[in-house]
Amino acid sequence: MRLAERLSRIKPSATLAINAKTQELRAQGRQVVSLAVGEPDFPTPEHICAAAKEAIEQGFTRYTAVPGIPELREQAARYYERFYGVSAPKEAVILSNGGKQALYNLFLALLGPGDEVLLPAPYWVSYPDMVALADAACVPVPAGADKNYLVDVDDLESAATPRTRALILNSPSNPTGCCYTQAQLDAIAEWAVARGIFVISDEVYDRLVYAPAEPATLSPWWKKHPENFAIIGALSKTFCMTGWRVGWCLAHPDLVKAMVKIQGQSTSNVCSITQKAALAALTGPWDLVEEMKTAFARRRDLVLEAIATWPGAVCPKPDGAFYAFPDVSACYTAQIPDSTTLCTKLLEEAETALVPGAAFGDDRCIRISYALDDATLARAMERIGAVLRGK
């Protein structure tokens, strides 16, 4: 069968490969623990589920406007005023099927052949492939554990070329959990504006930041320079709604119109029932978020304590999200030369699933998701340590 040439630019998902192997081992009766899944282990809050049930009972099951129902667009815009003091009109917001679709729409609307996108590495696995599908190319800008996996203006300036069209920032980061401070973001934003580079700020984990660190955002820069910035938000992580698929983009209204045109020819509106659930999330209590933050901070410390016992491992302290990204290259040998081989070994011998750092642009590392209960997490970390110490 002849397939489209563009598919040759897309790499197979490392996460899906690990999941497939995990399921294979579980089918054999082995008790594999997965530290590979990037979703909270808490249930969706009851008031959100109740809103969805009410929507069904009231027959709210028809098409809606492509960018979302007006009241939900307005509440998504108000999110930035509530937390950051940045006012925005609902016309600057489009609701999408998860933050992922918002990013994809954005790339299609902004990028084209010959365009380059600066991508700090480590990076979330889907950025390069989505950019490639938009006929553009990513230029990785590496920052190792010695820099807390965070780039600065000098790094970006060294990587920029006349073809640089955009920059992607993700804070808190998947896969590292590291966060830019507001001052660091401001410095990068000032540089990007001066260079005429469009900035895409993926802030889907912004409510999951642990004291003494504080949430930071580029939404004030969007307010000052709406033609230069777009902000991605979502409810998947904040309200444990990964399967509900709802996210948004805050952008210049003209760019939102372009994204609406794209979405209107692909998925149309987000599920009507999900929109009512999302409205309940944004307007209802936020108790669960604080509960999750307390649990994730405790689990993070448990993970870091275990990593400290691994031979030669280095791991900056994550200030957000629910990931750790240790550099374990000191454990590599002739038989275990890279992160993929190591993760395969840990899956088979420690019965623990992890994602190779190679999938995130840094083959020295492995990604650990600590979004599961403390006892299971502690047991998995001990298993990993036993294999690494016994190599």
Image: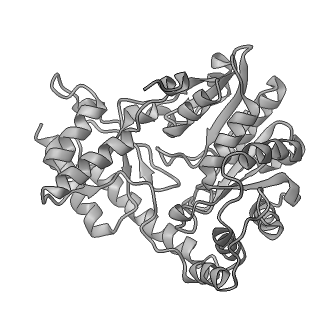
* Quadrant of residue 213 within the rendered picture: bottom right
Color encoding of the figure: one colour
Establish if 345 lies above or below 73: above
What residue is at 45 percent from the left and 59 percent from the top?
Answer: 39
Determine whether 92 is above or below 325 in the image. below
Evaluate whether residue 88 shows in this view: no
Query: Residue at (57%, 31%) from the top-left corner?
Result: 120
27 to 21, vertically: above or below: below
* Residue 191 left/right relative to 242: right
Question: In the image as oriented, which residue stretches furthest toward the left?
Answer: 390
**Identity of the residue drawn at 75% across and 40% down:** 186
Q: Residue furthest top?
A: 162
Would residue 162 be found to the left or right of residue 175 on screen?
right
Residue at horizontal 81%, vertical 41%?
A: 258
Q: In this rendering, does residue 316 appear at all?
A: yes
**In x, y percent, where is residue 84?**
77, 59
Rendered view: 163 above or below 153: above
Numbered label tally: 0
Q: Position of residue 72 (x, y in %)?
A: 77, 67
Dividing the image into 4 quarters, which one contains the C terminus?
Answer: top left
Camera-side residue of 378 and 358: 358
The spot of residue 284 in percent (x, y) is 68, 79
User: Residue 178 location, x and y as percent?
Assistant: 52, 46
Give the camera-side residue of 285 and 50. Answer: 50
Could you tell whether 156 is left or right of 49 in the image?
right
Q: The N terminus is located in which quarter?
A: top left
